Amino acid sequence: MSTGNKIAVKDFNFYYGSIQALQMINLDIKANEIFAILGPARSGKTTFLKSLNRLTDLVHGASHTGTILLDGEDIYAPRISLTQLRRRVGIVFDLPIPLPVSIYENVAYGPKLSNKTQKKYLDEIIEKALRSAFLWDEVKDRLHTSALRLSGGQQQRLCISRILALDPEVLLLDEPCSGLDPISTASIEETLSRLKKEYTIILVPHNIQQASRVADRVGFLLEGKLVEEGPAFEIFTRPKNKKTEDYISGKFG
Amino acid sequence: MEIKEIKERFIEKILLLIAFSSITILALITFFIFGEGLPLIWKIGPKSFLLGERWVPSQGEFGILPMIVGSFWVTFGALLLGIPLGLACAIFLCEWTPPWAGMILRSAIQVLAGIPSVVYGFWGLVVLVPLIRNFLGGPGLSILSGSLILSIMILPTIISISEDSLKALPPNYKAGAFALGATHWQTIWRVLIPAARSGIVASIILGMGRALGETMAMIMILGNAVKMPSSILDSARTLTTNIGIEMGYASGDHRQALFAAGVILFLIIMILNTLAIVLSRRRAG
Amino acid sequence: MKFERRRYLTQNIAKILIWMAALSTMAVMALIVFQVLWEGLPVLSLSFFLDSPRSMGREGGIFSTIVGTFALTIVAILFATPLGVGTAIFLWEYTREGRISRTIRFGIGCLAGVPSIIFGLFGFVFFVIYLNMGWSILSGGLTMAALILPTIISATEEALKAIPYSFREVSYSLGGTKWQTVTRAVIPSALPGIFTGIILGICRSIEETAVVILTAGSSLLIPTSLFSPVRTMSVHFYILSREGISMEMAYGTGAALILLVLIVNTVANWLLSRYVRKKA
C-alpha cells in the first residue's frame, strides 16, 4: 500500500488503435486533495480522466500499458468489477447531461442500478447527495419535476449529485464549468472546496485561473506527456519547465 | 467473474439468438418453398415449366409462361404510369408545396398507403372494369385495369423514397444551379434528379418488387384467363394470382406446381431486392 | 432573347404538367377512399358490427371477422415485438459493423422483400401441414409475425439510433452494465419510435389477405381457441367481392376496414403526442 496515495499512475501509456494519446504518465494523487490537470486542447486530459475509471474501455480499439493503482490495487486487473470501480471513481462531463426524467429519478439512477429500491432508503440518499452538491434547497420542492427544466448550473450540480449518491471516493471533473455563467461557476468551485474534505478530486479546469483558485496540486499535460507536476503555488509562480511557464503565461493555449 | 457478469454474457447470447431469427425464418421459407416446388420442376423439366404455354393441371400440363408474361405486362404497365406520376408527386412535394400543405399531403399519402390493397382491387372491380369494358371493349377484367390499379398502389412507395432522396441532397446543389442562371425547372430536371438518381432507382426497384408481389387485388381485376395475353385488354394471370386462385383446391402435383411457381417468383424478387440493397449501399457509401 | 423565352416556356409547361399530374394522382387516390366510404358508411350500424355473418355473408354483420382480425393481429404482435426489438437492440447496442451484423441485416432486408403470397405458401406448408397446427389463429398469427418482423426491427433501430450516445455514457459512468444501460437509459426514451413500429405492424396485419387465407382458413364462426380457423375482415371483404355475394355487405366491410385503419392511425398519433408532451 503506497503511503497515503489515493491513486498511483505508473508508466501509463494509452492508445486509441495505433494513435498514442498518453505517454509514460507517472503521477501520484493524494487522498482528499484537489488535483488540477492543465494543458492545451487535445493534449490527452479527457483521455487521462476517463482512464482512471476505465470509461475508455467503451472505445473500440483502446489499449494501454502500465498500471493505475487505486488504494494500491490495479484497476485493470481482471478480477476488478467495472461497475464497482465506476462507483468508487465517479465522473462529471463538461456538458451537463441530465437524463430525460425527474430530478429525483436522475439522482436515484445510480443507487437503483444495485437494486436498492426501498423508498425511504432512496429518499435519504438522494437528499444527502443533493445537499452535498448544494442543490437541495433549490429543488427540494420540485423533486419530481423534469430535470430538463433546471438551469445549466443546476443541471451540472445535478450531475454531481448523481455521483455523490453512490458514495464514491474519487471525483473526476472534466471542465465542469464550461458553458456556465460566472455565478454558477463560483458556486461549483465553492462546492468543490467543500467536497474535498470527503473526496479526492481530479479536475480539468476550464482555464488556468480556475486552477489557481481551487487546486492544491497541479499537473501540466502537453501532447500526451506529463511535463511537470507539483504544488499549485510552485507551478504557478516558479515552474521548473520552460513549456509549463510558456503555457501558464499564455504564450500558447 | 461475478454473477452479474455471467448474467450479462447470458443476455448477450440470447440477444444473438433472437437476432438470428430473421435469417432463420428466411432459411425456413427458402427450404420449404424450394422443397415443395423444386422436385416438380425437375420432374417436368425446367424448360417445359418455364417456357410451356399451357397450364392445364387436370392434364398434368404445367407451363407458366403465360403467367410470367402476364406478370411482366402488368408490372411494366404499372411502372410506365407509376414512375412519371410518382416522380411528379415527389417533385411537387419537394419543390412546390407550401410547408403547411406539405405535412397534410404527406400524412394523407401515408394513410393512403395503409389502405388495404383489397380495397383498391374492389374499387377497380366495381368502377374501373365496367368503364374499360364499356369504352374500350373486351371483358374489362384486363391487364389494362390491373396496371392502372397497381400503379396507384405502388405510388406511395415511389413517392416517399424519391422524395426522401431529393430532400437529402445538399442545398448547395440547388443554390449553385440558380447562381449559374438556371430556371427552377432546369435545376430540377438537370441537377437534382440526376443527383438523386440512385435513390429514385431504388424506389423504382422496390415499387417493382411490390407490383410483382401483389396478389389479391390482381385476382379481383385481372380476369384470370390462363392463356398467353395478346393485348392489354385481355384477361390474364400473373405468377401471384395463379397461386392465389388455385391454392385453395390444389393437391398433389398441382399443388407442387404452384409452389414451383412460387420458387420462380421468389427468385425474381430476391434478385430485385438484392439489387435495391446494393444500390442503396452505394448511395450511402 | 428567344432562348430565354423558350427556357421559361419549358419551365412553365413542366410546372403545369407536374401540378396536374400530382394533383390528379392524389385526387384519384382520395376518390377511391371516398367512394367506398360513401357507399359503405350507410351500411354500418351497431348490428352490423355485433352480428355475425349469416348465409355466407349475405346477411347479418361482420362480428366474427372483427374478432378474427383482432385475434390474429394480437398473436402476430405478441411474437414479432420481442423478436423485433431484441434484434434491433442486438444490432445497434451489442455489435459493430462486421460479418455478423452484415449477415443479419442482409437476412432482414431479404425478408422485407418477400411477397405476401410466398409467406402464405410458407405458412401453409410449415405451420398448417408440417407442424400440424391446421388452419388456425396460431398458424396465421405466427406467419403474420414473420411478415411484420422487418418493419418492427427497422422502426426500433431508428429509435435507438436517435438516442444520443451521451445517455449511454452517463449510465456506464454511474456503474451500469450494458443491459442496465439499454433497459434503463435507452429504451425508455426510444419507446415512441418502437411504438410507431408496432402500429405499422398492426396496420399491415389488418390489411393482409393472402397470408390469412392460406393459413387461417375462412371459417365464418367465432373462434373458440387459438387453434380455431378464423376469417379476418380483409379476407371477408375479398370473398364477398370476388364471389359476388353481396355488394352491399362488401361496401360495408370495405368501409369498416378503412375506418379501422384510420382509427388505429389516429389513436397512435394521439398516444404518441400525449406521451411526448408528458415527457417535455
Image (cartoon, rainbow, N blue to C red):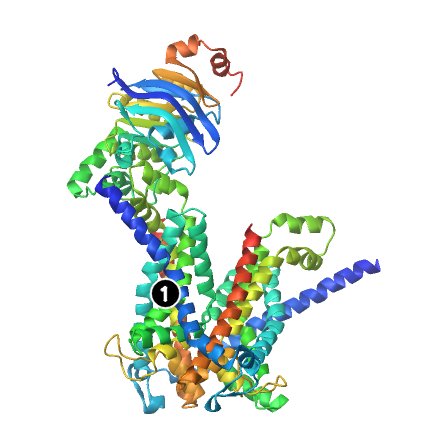
Residue in view at x 60 percent, y 74 percent: B76
Work out whether C53 lies above or below C266.
Answer: below
Q: Position of residue B150 (x, y in %)?
A: 54, 76
Compared across the picture, whether A212 is left or right of B208 comes to: left
Screen quadrant of the N terminus of chain C: bottom right
Indicate the secondary structure of the residue bearing disc 1.
helix
Q: Quadrant of residue C131?
A: bottom left
Who is closer to the viewer here, A212 or A63?
A63
The amino acid type of the residue labelled 1 equals Val
Work out whether A117 lies above or below C235.
Answer: above
Question: Disc count in the image?
Answer: 1
Q: Position of residue C213 (x, y in %)?
A: 38, 79
- Which residue is under mark 1? C267
Compared across the picture, whether C37 is left or right of A188 comes to: right
Residue A67 visible, this angle: yes
In the rendered image, the residue lying farthest to the right is: C1
Residue B99 visible, this angle: no
Work out whether B9 lies above or below A172.
Answer: below
Residue in view at x 38 percent, y 10 percent: A233
Residue in view at x 43 percent, y 46 percent: C96
